[in-house]
Image: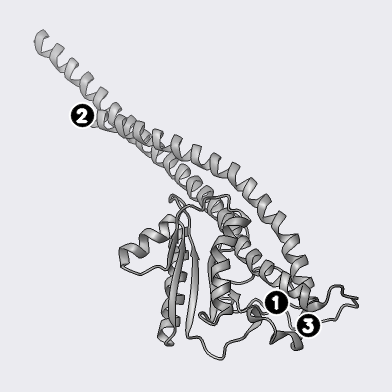
Amino acid sequence: MAQTQDLRRRIKSVENTRQITKTMEMVATSKLKRARQRVVAARPYAEALAEVLADLHGAELVEQFPLLRQPQSLRRVAVIAITSNRGLCGSFNANLIRETRDRIAELEDAGTAVELHQIGRKGIAYFRFTGRAMASARPDIGDRPTPEQADELVTPLMERFAAGELDAVEVVFARFVSPLSTPATLLPVLPIRPPTRGGKDGRMEGRKQRSNVPSARHSTANYILRPSAKDLLSAILPLYVRNQLFRALVETAASEQGARRTAMKSATDNAGEMIDTLRRTYNRARQAQITQEIAEIVGGAEAQAG
């Protein structure tokens, strides 16, 4: 009797868990749809910005803009790591943290000083637990990042890079390929290496990409510029850097919802299989119990008759 009661309690508990995971899967699906729309909406502007930057860029202008400065060596690098604020999304945060740790170790092994700027509670909690110092921690950026938040994050780093305090700025984020594919990606943001026309302008490619130069092909557009290319570049270069970080935030937010939907669907399916197994076990135990009770009744009746 005790065994069947325990099985009933376990079945009820797993059913409640399945209801929760199913609800979370539906919520993640709804959020994923909106997050994917934001990713798609951000791409045309980024691609157009990259094309204009490729047309304006010239060797004679590189020395006039600090954001285009290519350092001879990396003495100090700022790494911006993006994770989510919540869990229950499988290995999503673990992959981002692992990519961040690997990059930090790679830089420090080469003798480069690294300052970590962490976005997201999961990453903040991990690096605090391991005792890693963070230059900044931002748990306030949710699953709907804004261009203003990206501006707050990257503008101080741009100013420090222009002043020579930093030699590079890199971002670790989750690139949204599909709900089932959200690879951790390393994106160099500074110094700017302008994309070239005819390539994959404005796209974020590759898990281990160390450069944002999509193609070696270049074609000069026949433009009459007014104001001058110098004036245009002075306005476009900061926009380009801010847009790179904003897209990293948006793609990570979409990737989080995709990973959570996948994890919750798997949990729901596993709970359903566990319920089926427990019910079969319960039915066998109940059948054995009924058979035993019938045998006891028959034995008692025979004993009284005898």
Is residue 272 something that shows in the picture?
yes
Say which residue label 1 marks: 214
Q: Residue at x 42, y 72 (%)?
A: 101
Q: At label 2, which amino acid type do we have? A: Ala
Q: Is residue 300 above or below residue 26?
A: above
SS at mark 1?
A: loop
Say which residue label 3 marks: 217
Tell me how far mark 2 sits from mark 3, CA to CA. 75 Å
Whether the residues at callouts 2 and 1 have beta carbons within 8 Å, the answer is: no
Front tag of 2 and 3:
3
Residue 270, image x, y percentages? 43, 45
Say which residue label 2 marks: 2
Whether the residues at callouts 1 and 3 have beta carbons within 8 Å, the answer is: no
Quarter of image, res 55: bottom right
Tell me how far mark 2 sits from mark 1, CA to CA. 66 Å
Among numbered discs 2 and 3, the one appearing first in the sequence: 2
Local crowd at mark 3 within 10 Å, few (<14), some, or many (≥20)? few
Q: Quadrant of the image for the C terminus?
A: top left
Q: At label 1, which amino acid type do we have? A: Pro
Front tag of 2 and 1:
1
Tell me how far mark 1 sits from mark 3, CA to CA. 9 Å
SS at mark 2?
A: helix
Name, please, the residue furthest toward the top.
305
Local crowd at mark 2 within 10 Å, few (<14), some, or many (≥20)? few
Q: At label 3, which amino acid type do we have? A: Arg
